[in-house]
């Protein structure tokens, strides 16, 4: 009962909505609560004192987090923009220990499949990905009338062979596109491709571009 009261007083949050320090305190509280139950020789009061102490510590940290910006940055971190007007920001992506597939997964969860449709994507302090879509007037449509899901076929200058096989595509399609554009494979930070032959191409130190290739009717997912 005491544990339930303390958790309710800490605030109604799902695990995915917790800040890092809140998750750590919650885990420690859960561990403390099991000690008196696992060891009959340990007085119940010991567990209660530990839980209440951590609750007070949580309230103090929460106060500092709300009213002192420097402390908030240390405890919770700051939101990080991983997709901007130039495409995917690989520097920030590496700082967050995320890969391209993590970003694509987060986008699909937000109801968006294509990077070129994203104005900004932000990794929030709780680890969730927030996706802000472009206005319809800013979008360029390729392969209209087809439901497609792009996959990352080139990451950091290297082909993802498994993803190419997933699409039933040949790497020559992309190599020919690079030759036409005068780009080198080693300079490609990211290239995604879908079943309609639409390619999102992001070259190092350049903004992204979108192309329609001759590839049609791959296997899909």
Image (cartoon, rainbow, N blue to C red):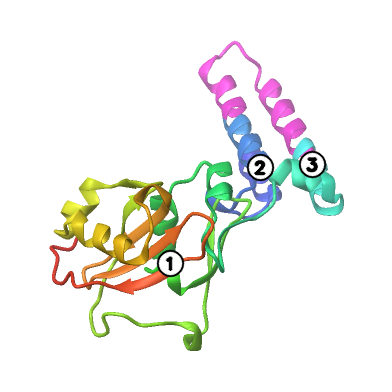
For mark 1, give the secondary structure: helix
How far is the residue under mark 3 from the one under mark 2? Answer: 9 Å
The segment highlighted magenta reads 31-56
| Residue positioned 52% across, 84% down in the render | 135
Task: State which tag comes first along the sequence, 3 or 2.
Answer: 2
**Relative to residue 175, is residue 99 depicted above or below?**
above
Q: Do the residues labelled 1 and 2 touch (CB within 8 Å)?
A: no
- Spot occupied by residue 147 in the image (x, y as percentages of width and height): 25, 76
Q: Which label belongs to residue 115?
A: 1
Q: From the viewer's perspective, is 21 left or right of 37?
A: right
- Spot occupied by residue 74 in the image (x, y as percentages of width and height): 75, 41
Q: Which label belongs to residue 22?
A: 2
| Residue positioned 65% across, 47% down in the render | 19
Magenta span contains residue 122 = no
How far is the residue under mark 1 from the one under mark 2? Answer: 32 Å
Q: From the viewer's perspective, is 162 left or right of 185?
A: left
Crowding around mark 3 (Cα neighbors within 10 Å: few <14, some 14 to 19, many 20+) is: some
Residue beneath label 3, please?
61
For mark 2, give the secondary structure: helix
| Residue positioned 16% across, 72% down in the render | 216
Q: Mark 3 or mark 1, which is nearer to you?
A: 1
Front in this rendered view, residue 49 or 115: 115
Q: From the viewer's perspective, is 111 left or right of 119?
A: left
């Amino acid at each position: 009962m005491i544990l339930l009261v303390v958790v309710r007083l800490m605030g109604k949050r799902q695990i995915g909505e917790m800040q890092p320090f809140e998750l750590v305190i919650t885990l420690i509280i859960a561990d403390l609560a099991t000690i008196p139950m696992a060891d009959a020789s340990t007085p119940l009061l010991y567990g209660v004192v530990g839980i209440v102490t951590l609750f007070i510590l949580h309230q103090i940290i929460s106060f500092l987090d709300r009213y002192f910006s420097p402390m908030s940055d240390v405890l919770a971190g700051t939101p990080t923009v991983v997709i901007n007007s130039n495409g995917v920001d690989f520097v920030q992506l590496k700082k967050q220990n995320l890969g391209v597939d993590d970003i694509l997964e987060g986008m699909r969860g937000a109801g968006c499949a294509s990077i070129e449709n994203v104005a900004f994507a932000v990794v929030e302090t709780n680890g969730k990905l927030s996706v802000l879509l472009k206005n319809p007037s800013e979008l360029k449509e390729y392969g209209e009338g087809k439901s497609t899901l792009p996959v990352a076929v080139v990451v950091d200058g290297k082909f993802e062979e498994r993803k190419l096989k997933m699409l039933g595509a040949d790497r020559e399609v992309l190599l020919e596109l690079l030759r036409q554009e005068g780009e080198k494979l080693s300079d490609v930070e990211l290239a995604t491709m879908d079943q309609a032959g639409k390619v999102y191409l992001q070259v190092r130190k350049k903004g992204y571009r979108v192309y329609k290739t001759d590839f049609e009717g791959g296997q899909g997912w």
